[in-house]
Amino acid sequence: MVTFMRHAGAGLTVACAAVLGLASVAAADGHVRVVVAFDLDKGEIAEGVAVDSTGDLYTGISAQGRMLKVPGGIGEPETFAVLEGLQEGDFGFVGHAVDASGDVYTAAMSMNPEVNGVWRFDAATGEGEHIAGTEGMAMPNAIDFGEDGTMYVSDTIMGAVWHAPAGAPAQPWVVDPLLLGTNETPLPFPIGANGVDVVDGTVYVGVTEQSSVVAVPINEDGSAGEPSVFLELEGVFVDGIVFDTNGDLYVADPPAHTLWKVTPDGSIDVVADVDDGLDGTSSVALWTDPDGQKTAYVSNQSVGIGTPLQHGPSVIALNLE
């Protein structure tokens, strides 16, 4: 079941609540391309993906703390930055983002407080800076930025979003039951607030185990408004999320190895699935080139919950019509 709710301030209006048939999004022949492939046997897992304003793509080999840059999204992957201090057993890199200046950010999960949190890597040099305050996050995950440069970061275990206004330390911005996990998955911790996308003064948060997207308005003073359910996707393990300029929402669903698209009228389509090479789909980033061709870059973490894996970890490019 898909329930679509349009957010208007703190109120909710149900726009569509129906059992919908699933349809594949039409795509041109050869619409799938492997940007970079990893070796799961070597522990190479890539959870996040981001693209900058010029089309350069960034992804990280999580446990190695190694950030890769793929020039133009088509070139040979090159090491952009390395994060030192990860401990054995740390997950390492999670979500990535690029700010308006082109600097690259990553959330890092580590038992080492000197490493745990969010890191900014200088666009020109790759030099890293630990964002103050983020070392206290329980599980830093996805990152995005508001128009004023404020950084918003999901904390999956805490059921929270943290924020850091430009030049200020990070601190919890909103903690709410709508952002909590339910412990329904076979993991040792709850999977709550996950993917983040900031659009038109609202922070949208994918809440994995609640199969929902929650909207948190940004008040004029920068504080968090009242969270409300924007979208319910029954049975979907909501991970990375991103809106396009048409208001369509793309949702990564790792156990289903699927990238979904939800339109403003509440219809849901399969953009790509395991038959297209998806495998533990965790994050998605959108890029439109100067000719208007739109591409979805999808990271395949290749770790699922209760489902077989087939293709292995990678980043895949999907041409969208």
Image (cartoon, grey):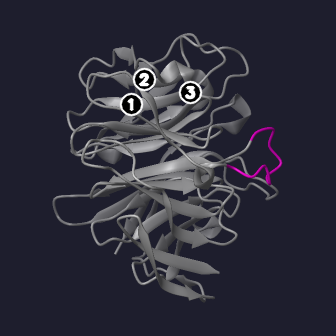
* Image position, residue 179 (x, y; %): 59, 51
* Image position, residue 155 (x, y; %): 56, 38
The number of numbered discs placed on residues in the rendered structure image is 3
Q: CA distance from mark 1 to mark 3?
A: 15 Å
Q: Are marks 1 and 3 in contact (CB under 8 Å)?
A: no
Q: Circle 1 — which element?
A: strand
Quadrant into which the C terminus falls: bottom left
* Image position, residue 127 (x, y; %): 34, 14
The residue that label 3 is drawn on is 137
Amino acid carrying label 3: it is Met
Amino acid carrying label 1: it is Tyr
Q: Of the residues tagged 2 and 3, which is closer to the observer?
A: 3
The residue that label 2 is drawn on is 119
Q: What secondary structure prevails in the magenta region? A: loop
Residue extent of the magenta highlight = 181-189
Q: Circle 2 — which element?
A: strand
Of labels 1 and 3, earlier in sequence is 1
Amino acid carrying label 2: it is Trp
Q: Is residue 184 magenta?
A: yes
Q: Is residue 251 left or right of residue 185?
A: left
Q: Residue 63 or 277: which is nearer the viewer?
A: 63
In the picture, residue 101 is in which quadrant? top left
